[in-house]
Image: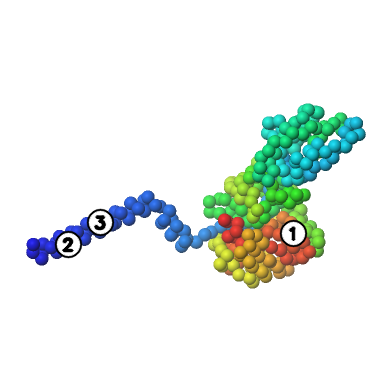
Amino acid sequence: MSKKKIKIIGKYLFLAGLIIGIVSVILYEKDHPFRTMAVDYQIKEEYVYPVGLPVGIYLRTNGVMVIDTVTVEGKDGTVKNPTNGRIHSGDYITAFNGEPVGNKSKLQYLIQKNQISPVVLSVVSNNIWKKVQITPVKTKNGEYQLGIWIRDDMQSIGTLSFITESRQFFSLGHGICDIDTGALLSSNEGSLYLANVWGVKKGEPGKPGGLCGSIDYSNQKMIGKIEVNSSNGIWGTIFGNQLKPYQIEKMKVGHSDFVRTGNAKIKFIWKGKPRYYDIEIVQLDTSLTEKNMVVHITDKKLLKQTNGIVQGMSGCPIIQKNRVVGVLTHVMVNHPNFGYGIVIDKICQ
Protein backbone atom coordinates (compact mmCIF):
# COMPACT_ATOMS: atom_id res chain seq x y z
CA MET A 1 0.00 0.00 0.00
CA SER A 2 1.36 3.40 -0.97
CA LYS A 3 2.26 6.07 1.60
CA LYS A 4 -0.38 8.37 0.04
CA LYS A 5 -3.18 5.84 0.68
CA ILE A 6 -1.94 5.28 4.25
CA LYS A 7 -2.09 9.03 4.97
CA ILE A 8 -5.65 9.27 3.55
CA ILE A 9 -6.80 6.30 5.66
CA GLY A 10 -5.12 7.84 8.72
CA LYS A 11 -6.98 11.13 8.23
CA TYR A 12 -10.31 9.34 7.98
CA LEU A 13 -9.59 7.32 11.11
CA PHE A 14 -8.64 10.48 12.99
CA LEU A 15 -11.84 12.26 11.90
CA ALA A 16 -13.92 9.21 12.82
CA GLY A 17 -12.31 9.07 16.27
CA LEU A 18 -12.88 12.79 16.80
CA ILE A 19 -16.57 12.50 15.87
CA ILE A 20 -17.04 9.50 18.15
CA GLY A 21 -15.39 11.41 21.01
CA ILE A 22 -17.61 14.47 20.55
CA VAL A 23 -20.76 12.34 20.39
CA SER A 24 -19.69 10.46 23.54
CA VAL A 25 -19.19 13.72 25.45
CA ILE A 26 -22.61 15.04 24.36
CA LEU A 27 -24.35 11.82 25.41
CA TYR A 28 -22.52 11.80 28.76
CA GLU A 29 -23.51 15.38 29.51
CA LYS A 30 -27.11 14.56 28.59
CA ASP A 31 -27.18 11.68 31.10
CA HIS A 32 -25.18 13.58 33.77
CA PRO A 33 -26.60 17.15 33.82
CA PHE A 34 -25.59 17.82 37.43
CA ARG A 35 -21.91 17.82 36.50
CA THR A 36 -22.31 20.90 34.32
CA MET A 37 -24.66 22.55 36.84
CA ALA A 38 -22.13 22.04 39.62
CA VAL A 39 -19.41 23.79 37.61
CA ASP A 40 -21.75 26.68 36.74
CA TYR A 41 -22.78 27.04 40.41
CA GLN A 42 -19.19 27.59 41.49
CA ILE A 43 -18.76 30.63 39.26
CA LYS A 44 -22.26 32.08 39.60
CA GLU A 45 -22.78 34.93 42.06
CA GLU A 46 -25.58 34.47 44.61
CA TYR A 47 -28.05 37.23 45.34
CA VAL A 48 -30.75 37.89 47.93
CA TYR A 49 -33.09 40.80 48.60
CA PRO A 50 -32.27 42.20 52.10
CA VAL A 51 -35.52 43.38 53.69
CA GLY A 52 -35.32 44.36 57.39
CA LEU A 53 -39.09 44.82 57.79
CA PRO A 54 -40.89 44.14 61.11
CA VAL A 55 -43.50 41.44 60.50
CA GLY A 56 -46.11 39.49 62.41
CA ILE A 57 -45.36 35.80 62.86
CA TYR A 58 -48.10 33.24 63.50
CA LEU A 59 -46.88 29.68 64.07
CA ARG A 60 -49.27 26.76 64.37
CA THR A 61 -48.07 23.99 66.64
CA ASN A 62 -48.41 20.28 65.86
CA GLY A 63 -50.84 19.56 68.68
CA VAL A 64 -50.74 21.31 72.06
CA MET A 65 -47.54 21.70 74.06
CA VAL A 66 -47.35 20.64 77.70
CA ILE A 67 -45.82 23.46 79.74
CA ASP A 68 -46.01 21.72 83.12
CA THR A 69 -47.89 19.08 85.12
CA VAL A 70 -49.61 19.87 88.43
CA THR A 71 -51.60 18.23 91.21
CA VAL A 72 -55.37 18.64 91.26
CA GLU A 73 -57.68 18.79 94.27
CA GLY A 74 -60.71 16.61 93.67
CA LYS A 75 -64.29 17.23 94.71
CA ASP A 76 -63.78 15.01 97.78
CA GLY A 77 -60.74 17.04 98.88
CA THR A 78 -58.09 14.51 97.89
CA VAL A 79 -55.06 15.77 95.95
CA LYS A 80 -54.02 13.80 92.90
CA ASN A 81 -51.53 14.00 90.06
CA PRO A 82 -53.48 12.52 87.10
CA THR A 83 -50.44 12.26 84.80
CA ASN A 84 -48.42 10.33 87.41
CA GLY A 85 -45.13 11.17 85.68
CA ARG A 86 -46.20 9.80 82.30
CA ILE A 87 -46.36 13.22 80.62
CA HIS A 88 -43.61 15.82 80.89
CA SER A 89 -42.89 19.45 80.11
CA GLY A 90 -42.15 19.84 76.39
CA ASP A 91 -44.35 16.91 75.27
CA TYR A 92 -47.00 17.43 72.59
CA ILE A 93 -50.53 16.05 72.83
CA THR A 94 -51.77 15.31 69.30
CA ALA A 95 -54.95 13.28 69.86
CA PHE A 96 -57.63 12.64 72.50
CA ASN A 97 -59.16 9.14 72.31
CA GLY A 98 -58.00 9.00 68.69
CA GLU A 99 -59.48 12.39 67.75
CA PRO A 100 -56.84 14.87 66.46
CA VAL A 101 -56.17 17.87 68.68
CA GLY A 102 -54.85 21.03 67.03
CA ASN A 103 -55.35 23.63 69.76
CA LYS A 104 -55.95 23.89 73.49
CA SER A 105 -59.57 25.01 73.09
CA LYS A 106 -60.49 21.72 71.45
CA LEU A 107 -58.59 19.71 74.07
CA GLN A 108 -60.35 21.54 76.90
CA TYR A 109 -63.72 20.95 75.20
CA LEU A 110 -63.06 17.22 74.83
CA ILE A 111 -61.97 16.92 78.48
CA GLN A 112 -65.21 18.46 79.73
CA LYS A 113 -67.29 16.39 77.32
CA ASN A 114 -65.55 13.17 78.36
CA GLN A 115 -66.00 13.93 82.09
CA ILE A 116 -64.64 11.25 84.46
CA SER A 117 -64.03 8.42 82.00
CA PRO A 118 -60.39 7.35 81.44
CA VAL A 119 -58.93 8.83 78.27
CA VAL A 120 -56.08 7.85 75.95
CA LEU A 121 -53.81 10.68 74.85
CA SER A 122 -51.50 10.41 71.84
CA VAL A 123 -48.26 12.08 72.92
CA VAL A 124 -45.00 12.98 71.19
CA SER A 125 -42.10 13.02 73.64
CA ASN A 126 -38.56 13.68 72.33
CA ASN A 127 -39.69 12.63 68.84
CA ILE A 128 -41.10 9.34 70.21
CA TRP A 129 -44.80 8.63 69.76
CA LYS A 130 -46.64 7.00 72.66
CA LYS A 131 -50.11 6.59 74.11
CA VAL A 132 -50.89 7.51 77.71
CA GLN A 133 -54.06 6.64 79.63
CA ILE A 134 -55.21 9.21 82.20
CA THR A 135 -58.30 9.48 84.37
CA PRO A 136 -59.57 13.08 84.71
CA VAL A 137 -60.24 14.53 88.17
CA LYS A 138 -63.51 16.30 88.94
CA THR A 139 -62.81 19.47 90.94
CA LYS A 140 -64.99 21.22 93.53
CA ASN A 141 -66.31 23.66 90.92
CA GLY A 142 -67.50 20.80 88.72
CA GLU A 143 -64.77 21.00 86.09
CA TYR A 144 -62.70 18.07 84.87
CA GLN A 145 -58.92 18.39 84.75
CA LEU A 146 -55.94 16.33 83.61
CA GLY A 147 -53.40 18.22 85.70
CA ILE A 148 -51.51 19.79 82.79
CA TRP A 149 -50.70 23.34 81.71
CA ILE A 150 -50.79 23.64 77.93
CA ARG A 151 -50.11 26.12 75.14
CA ASP A 152 -50.83 26.04 71.43
CA ASP A 153 -50.18 28.56 68.65
CA MET A 154 -47.57 31.31 68.99
CA GLN A 155 -47.70 34.91 67.79
CA SER A 156 -44.90 37.49 67.86
CA ILE A 157 -43.19 40.31 65.98
CA GLY A 158 -39.84 39.72 64.32
CA THR A 159 -37.90 41.06 61.34
CA LEU A 160 -38.03 39.67 57.82
CA SER A 161 -34.37 39.15 56.89
CA PHE A 162 -34.20 38.52 53.16
CA ILE A 163 -35.91 37.00 50.16
CA THR A 164 -34.18 34.73 47.66
CA GLU A 165 -34.56 34.97 43.88
CA SER A 166 -36.88 31.94 44.07
CA ARG A 167 -39.19 33.92 46.44
CA GLN A 168 -38.21 32.01 49.56
CA PHE A 169 -38.01 34.17 52.68
CA PHE A 170 -35.90 33.88 55.82
CA SER A 171 -36.55 35.54 59.18
CA LEU A 172 -35.30 35.82 62.79
CA GLY A 173 -31.93 34.02 62.75
CA HIS A 174 -33.04 31.83 65.67
CA GLY A 175 -35.77 29.27 66.13
CA ILE A 176 -39.18 29.99 67.65
CA CYS A 177 -39.16 28.41 71.10
CA ASP A 178 -41.64 28.17 73.95
CA ILE A 179 -41.10 31.03 76.41
CA ASP A 180 -41.44 28.74 79.44
CA THR A 181 -39.67 25.54 78.43
CA GLY A 182 -37.18 26.99 75.94
CA ALA A 183 -37.90 24.06 73.61
CA LEU A 184 -38.14 24.59 69.85
CA LEU A 185 -41.83 24.61 68.93
CA SER A 186 -42.83 21.56 66.96
CA SER A 187 -44.28 23.21 63.89
CA ASN A 188 -43.52 23.70 60.23
CA GLU A 189 -46.67 25.64 59.40
CA GLY A 190 -47.70 29.23 59.89
CA SER A 191 -48.20 32.61 58.28
CA LEU A 192 -46.35 35.89 57.91
CA TYR A 193 -48.21 39.21 58.18
CA LEU A 194 -47.48 42.90 57.91
CA ALA A 195 -47.09 44.45 61.36
CA ASN A 196 -48.06 47.91 62.56
CA VAL A 197 -45.16 49.05 64.76
CA TRP A 198 -45.99 52.31 66.49
CA GLY A 199 -43.28 52.61 69.15
CA VAL A 200 -40.25 51.20 70.93
CA LYS A 201 -39.59 50.28 74.54
CA LYS A 202 -35.92 51.07 75.03
CA GLY A 203 -33.64 48.37 76.35
CA GLU A 204 -31.88 48.69 79.69
CA PRO A 205 -29.20 46.56 81.36
CA GLY A 206 -31.04 43.43 82.56
CA LYS A 207 -34.30 44.51 80.88
CA PRO A 208 -34.48 43.90 77.14
CA GLY A 209 -36.64 46.39 75.29
CA GLY A 210 -38.99 45.62 72.44
CA LEU A 211 -40.94 46.86 69.46
CA CYS A 212 -44.46 48.01 70.34
CA GLY A 213 -47.06 47.19 67.73
CA SER A 214 -49.93 45.04 66.57
CA ILE A 215 -50.59 42.42 63.91
CA ASP A 216 -53.54 42.42 61.53
CA TYR A 217 -54.35 38.75 60.85
CA SER A 218 -56.60 39.48 57.89
CA ASN A 219 -55.90 37.78 54.57
CA GLN A 220 -55.16 41.16 53.01
CA LYS A 221 -52.16 41.59 55.35
CA MET A 222 -50.77 38.08 54.87
CA ILE A 223 -47.50 38.18 52.93
CA GLY A 224 -46.09 34.69 53.25
CA LYS A 225 -46.39 31.08 54.37
CA ILE A 226 -44.07 29.64 57.03
CA GLU A 227 -42.84 26.19 56.09
CA VAL A 228 -39.84 25.52 58.38
CA ASN A 229 -39.11 26.43 62.01
CA SER A 230 -35.45 25.53 62.50
CA SER A 231 -32.99 26.29 65.28
CA ASN A 232 -31.51 29.05 63.08
CA GLY A 233 -34.72 30.74 61.96
CA ILE A 234 -37.87 30.34 59.92
CA TRP A 235 -38.16 29.72 56.18
CA GLY A 236 -41.13 30.00 53.89
CA THR A 237 -42.59 31.30 50.65
CA ILE A 238 -43.37 34.97 50.08
CA PHE A 239 -46.33 35.97 47.90
CA GLY A 240 -48.16 39.05 46.72
CA ASN A 241 -46.73 42.51 46.13
CA GLN A 242 -47.07 43.87 49.67
CA LEU A 243 -43.33 44.65 49.82
CA LYS A 244 -43.22 46.55 46.51
CA PRO A 245 -43.50 50.03 48.14
CA TYR A 246 -40.20 49.48 49.98
CA GLN A 247 -38.25 49.23 46.68
CA ILE A 248 -36.03 46.39 47.92
CA GLU A 249 -33.07 45.77 45.60
CA LYS A 250 -31.09 42.56 45.36
CA MET A 251 -27.59 42.36 46.78
CA LYS A 252 -24.73 39.89 46.52
CA VAL A 253 -24.23 37.30 49.26
CA GLY A 254 -21.01 37.36 51.28
CA HIS A 255 -20.09 33.92 52.64
CA SER A 256 -17.94 33.08 55.66
CA ASP A 257 -14.71 33.55 53.77
CA PHE A 258 -15.79 37.11 52.91
CA VAL A 259 -16.99 38.47 56.25
CA ARG A 260 -14.44 40.14 58.54
CA THR A 261 -14.40 41.87 61.91
CA GLY A 262 -14.81 45.61 61.57
CA ASN A 263 -17.40 48.05 60.29
CA ALA A 264 -20.74 46.84 58.93
CA LYS A 265 -24.40 47.88 58.85
CA ILE A 266 -27.82 46.47 59.68
CA LYS A 267 -30.89 47.26 57.61
CA PHE A 268 -34.17 48.05 59.35
CA ILE A 269 -37.34 49.53 57.86
CA TRP A 270 -38.64 52.08 60.37
CA LYS A 271 -41.86 54.03 59.79
CA GLY A 272 -42.01 52.79 56.22
CA LYS A 273 -38.50 53.88 55.25
CA PRO A 274 -35.45 51.62 54.80
CA ARG A 275 -32.63 52.72 57.10
CA TYR A 276 -29.06 51.53 57.48
CA TYR A 277 -27.44 51.69 60.92
CA ASP A 278 -23.73 51.45 61.69
CA ILE A 279 -22.46 48.49 63.69
CA GLU A 280 -19.11 46.87 64.36
CA ILE A 281 -18.44 43.14 64.14
CA VAL A 282 -16.14 42.76 67.14
CA GLN A 283 -15.83 38.95 67.22
CA LEU A 284 -16.18 36.33 64.50
CA ASP A 285 -16.13 32.53 64.70
CA THR A 286 -17.61 30.86 61.63
CA SER A 287 -17.07 27.36 63.06
CA LEU A 288 -20.01 27.80 65.45
CA THR A 289 -23.48 26.69 64.39
CA GLU A 290 -25.04 29.87 65.80
CA LYS A 291 -24.00 33.20 67.32
CA ASN A 292 -21.02 33.40 64.95
CA MET A 293 -20.70 37.15 65.40
CA VAL A 294 -20.63 39.51 68.34
CA VAL A 295 -21.84 42.90 67.14
CA HIS A 296 -21.69 46.35 68.70
CA ILE A 297 -24.28 49.00 67.82
CA THR A 298 -22.37 52.22 67.14
CA ASP A 299 -24.99 54.26 65.28
CA LYS A 300 -25.98 57.28 67.40
CA LYS A 301 -29.46 57.58 65.87
CA LEU A 302 -30.33 53.97 66.63
CA LEU A 303 -28.88 54.21 70.15
CA LYS A 304 -31.05 57.27 70.77
CA GLN A 305 -34.18 55.45 69.55
CA THR A 306 -33.68 52.04 71.17
CA ASN A 307 -30.52 52.04 73.36
CA GLY A 308 -29.27 49.29 71.06
CA ILE A 309 -30.95 46.01 70.12
CA VAL A 310 -34.54 45.33 71.24
CA GLN A 311 -36.81 42.32 70.91
CA GLY A 312 -38.39 42.28 67.47
CA MET A 313 -35.19 43.31 65.68
CA SER A 314 -34.06 39.70 65.41
CA GLY A 315 -33.64 39.08 61.72
CA CYS A 316 -32.17 42.42 60.63
CA PRO A 317 -29.82 41.67 57.72
CA ILE A 318 -26.14 42.41 58.35
CA ILE A 319 -24.40 44.03 55.40
CA GLN A 320 -20.66 44.43 54.92
CA LYS A 321 -19.04 45.95 51.83
CA ASN A 322 -22.33 45.83 49.92
CA ARG A 323 -22.87 42.13 50.58
CA VAL A 324 -25.37 40.39 52.85
CA VAL A 325 -23.15 38.45 55.25
CA GLY A 326 -25.56 37.45 58.03
CA VAL A 327 -28.49 38.22 60.29
CA LEU A 328 -28.87 39.83 63.72
CA THR A 329 -30.18 37.23 66.22
CA HIS A 330 -29.96 38.14 69.92
CA VAL A 331 -29.33 41.00 72.31
CA MET A 332 -26.97 40.76 75.27
CA VAL A 333 -29.46 41.35 78.07
CA ASN A 334 -27.00 43.17 80.35
CA HIS A 335 -25.48 45.17 77.48
CA PRO A 336 -28.28 46.16 75.05
CA ASN A 337 -25.86 47.88 72.66
CA PHE A 338 -24.20 44.51 72.06
CA GLY A 339 -25.69 41.41 70.49
CA TYR A 340 -25.12 38.36 68.34
CA GLY A 341 -25.43 37.53 64.68
CA ILE A 342 -25.28 34.44 62.50
CA VAL A 343 -23.36 34.19 59.23
CA ILE A 344 -25.46 33.52 56.16
CA ASP A 345 -23.77 30.14 55.50
CA LYS A 346 -25.29 28.67 58.67
CA ILE A 347 -28.83 29.68 57.81
CA CYS A 348 -28.63 28.49 54.19
CA GLN A 349 -27.43 24.95 54.95
Residue at mark 3: 19
CA gap, disc 3 and disc 1? 67 Å
**Which image quarter is the N terminus in?**
bottom left
Mark 1 or mark 3, which is nearer the start of the sequence? 3
Q: SS at mark 3?
A: helix
**Which image quarter is the C terminus in?**
bottom right
Which residue is situated farthest in the bottom direction here? 262
Q: SS at mark 2?
A: helix
Front-most of residues 344 and 286: 286
- Indicate whether 227 appears above or below 159: above
Residue at mark 2: 10
Residue 11, located in which quarter of the rendered image? Answer: bottom left
**Callout 1 amino acid:** Val
Mark 2 or mark 1, which is nearer the start of the sequence? 2
Residue 15, located in which quarter of the rendered image? Answer: bottom left
Q: Specify whether 219 is left or right of 115.
A: left
Residue at mark 1: 310
Q: Residue at x 68, y 66 (%)?
A: 294
- Indicate whether 1 appears above or below 96: below
**Callout 3 amino acid:** Ile
Front-most of residues 4 and 330: 4
Say few, some or many: other residues with alpha carbon within 10 Å of mark 3 (under 14 / 14 to 19 / 20 or more): few
Which residue is situated farthest in the left direction here? 2
- Residue 208: x and y in percent read 78, 59
Q: Residue at x 64, y 49 (%)?
A: 229
Q: SS at mark 1?
A: loop
Q: Nearer the viewer, mark 3 or mark 1?
A: 3
